[in-house]
Structures are given as C-alpha cells and as structure tokens.
Amino acid sequence: MKNENKVAMPTDVSIITTYRCQMECKMCDIWQNWTDPKLEITPQELEILPNFKFVNITGGEPFLRDDLEEIIEVMYKKSDRIVISTSGWHTSKILKLAERFPNIGIRVSIEGLSVKNDDLRGKHGGFDKGLRTLLGLKKMGVKDVGFGITVSNKNSNDMLWLYELSKELDMEFATASFHNSYYFHKDDNWVTNKDEVTEDFHELIQRLMKENSPKSWFRAFFNLGLINYIHGGKRMLPCQAGTANFFIDPYGDVLPCNGLEDKYWKESMGNIREVNNFEELWFSDQANKVRDLVRSCPKNCWMVGTAAPVMKNYIKHPLKWVVKNKIKSLLGKEICTDFIPSYDVGQDPRQGDLRLPQGYEETLAQAKEKRVLLDKSMKEASSCGCE
C-alpha cells in the first residue's frame, strides 16, 4: 500500500459534537446514552485542529448544542467546506444558522416516506419536519442541501422513492446501511432480508448510472460496496481510517472511525485536551499503533466517511468500473451487481476478513461458510461475463 508508513496530515474530519439526540431511532441507541453538556468539547478546544478539505459536523443532534454557531465559526477558519448531519427536527435553528453561513452544507437523515421514517426514527412528525427544513433551505438559496437514508430491513424500497424525490427537488441524495459499533450502541444491526435489499440497491445503481452526472456514477460504485458489505464480502478497497480522515468524539478523543466495536478493538489515538498541538497527537506512537490496528482490522465496514477517501486515493479502480458500466448503461444493458470486485493495492490480507474474537467460534464457522458461498457466486458471475 502506498505511503503506508509515511503519514501526512489528515484532509477530512468528522466532529461528533454531542451524543444528545431527541430522536429515538431503532437502528441507533445514541439517544439512550446522552453526553453531559458540561463535558462536551468546546469551540475554543477545537482551535487546536489543523486545516482540512472537508469537515463534517455530526452527533447525536448537533443542533442541541447552544454554541453550534461558534463551532462552525471556528471550523470555517480551517476549511472552506462544512457539512452538518442532522435529523432536520429543529427547523428554525437550522434556517437561522444557514442565514449566517449561507455556504454551509446540510444533510437531513430521512429513513423512508412519512410513515416508515417516523416509525424507524421514533418520532411522529419527523418526516414532515425534515422535509420542511429541506424546503426552507432550498427557498433561502442554500445550494449544498440534501438528505440521506440508512437502509435497514424495513426501508430499502422507500430508498428508491426518496431517490426520485431528491431528483425532483434537485438535492443531494446519500445512502448507507446500518452498522454495529460503539457509536450506534448496537450489536444487532444485521440485514436479514438480503435478497430484497440487494435488489433495491441493484435498481438504484441502474438509475444512478443512467444520470448525466459523474458524481452519480461514482455513487453507484459506492452502492455496489454496500451490497458487498451486506453480503459479508471483504471491502472493495482498503480502509485507511486514521490516515486521511478521523473522528473526534464529544470528549475530545481522536478515533480513526465511528465503526469500532469493543469486542474487536477500540482505541483512541489521543485526546486533543491532552496535547499542546495537533501534530503531537497525530504523529504519536499511540496514533501509529491505532493505524496498525486499522491495517489488520477484521471489520468490513463500508461507510462514506472511510470509503470516499480511498475511492479518491485509488481512483483508477472505481474509474475503470464507472467507465465500463456507463458504456453498458448507454447501450441499454443492465449493470451487473452479482460480481463484486475486490482490489489488491498491497493492503494487509487480514483487513476486513470478518474473523471474530475468541468465543465466537460457531459464528466464525458460519461466516466462513458464507464466505465460501460468496466466493463461489463471484466465480460463477465472472465465468458468465458479469465481471
């Protein structure tokens, strides 16, 4: 893997401003694990951070922070592009902040159409408030606006309707699949109706590839990675969390990603409250130890925060897939999603191999059996020309 031992300064950061949240989502239990506002990182403490190409402000619900505007003010000194992830519940606060920062990006989490969204997010009226927020931002002329869905077992078909809605509203549309991690406080986020969910992602990929936007074509590649993740395949591209990007939790701990689980491993790279400057933390022995753990991490997560940087870093691989399948789309042919490419760029073969901790032998055997079946289906797909 190129530059494996030569760590540069990061380009992307996700700041978890709080674990407080007014929603009660079924796929995330942050709302049952609130942080103490008195202990959350302050805008002044974020001054220690370096400059970035991209900053994501997330939670919990960031708009529960009374000093969110001060946080944004600090981070605009360090990056030209900031996107806030929100439930969209606090419409007036969001519109007020957008008046002050008209170039801000806003992404509203919507898990389906009205009934499905409100059921999954645990709050009646959540869909209406989210849509009202989006339309309000659009009316104000805010350009970097969109919404995204986290696909679980119950909402993959609504994903297609939300995609069509995003096109009608001329807004960004993002997708994810639910994961297990310390961040979500979940260990039972598994897609069980894989065939239905896979078919809906397959259809989304067809529609994305028919668009005239290169961004949509690369999103199709990303969604192929979600199909792969759901079926337990190794990551299409390596994870380099803690190298190009990282997360800061509400207490100032710097973490490589938000997909860590205690049953595998979970270590901080350091805490911004305990160093004199960020370089001291970023180039520390502890930070390098965490990067080594990432290189052999068994999880096969596929989240935009860690997938997007490596898609850019190894652009020739997604580009080849995009060009090939855009031609197929133009010729009226269906994009094959049965074969999932996996690219060897010199990464540790243990990374994303789904090995489990001790005490999970039976589950591991089942995982190996699934892996054999997956490899077999890939070979069959390749032999039929799908590759």
Image (cartoon, rainbow, N blue to C red):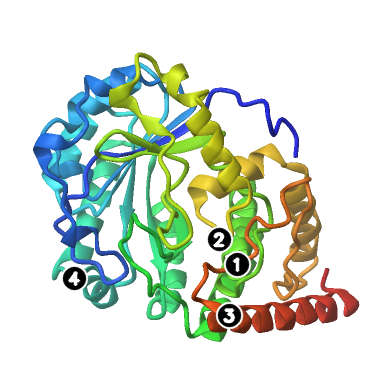
**Amino acid type at mark 4:** Gly
- Which of the two marks, 4 or 1, is nearer to us in this view? 1
Who is closer to the viewer here, 111 or 140? 111
In the image, residue 262 above or below residue 292 = below
* Comes first in the chain, label 4 or label 1: 4
Q: Which mark is residue 354?
A: 1
Quarter of the image for residue 68 reads: top left
Q: Which residue is mark 3?
A: 199
Which of the marked residues, 1 or 2, is nearer the chain's N terminus?
A: 2
Residue at coordinates 63% horizontally, 46% vertically from top-left? 295
Indicate which label's residue lies in the foreground, 3 or 2: 2
Q: SS of the residue at dot 4?
A: loop
Amino acid type of disc 2? Lys
| Mark toward the start of the polypeptide (4 vs 3) | 4
Furthest toward the front, the residue is 358
Return the x and y of residue 189 as percentages of the image width and height.
Answer: 40, 72
Q: As drawn, is 312 to the left or to the right of 65? A: right
Q: Earlier in the sequence, mark 1 or mark 3?
A: 3
Residue 329 lies, in percent from the top left, at: 74, 64
CA separation in Å, label 1 and label 3: 24 Å
Q: Nearer the viewer, residue 204 or 79?
A: 79
Q: Which residue is mark 2?
A: 299
Q: Would you say residue 143 is visible in this rendering?
A: no
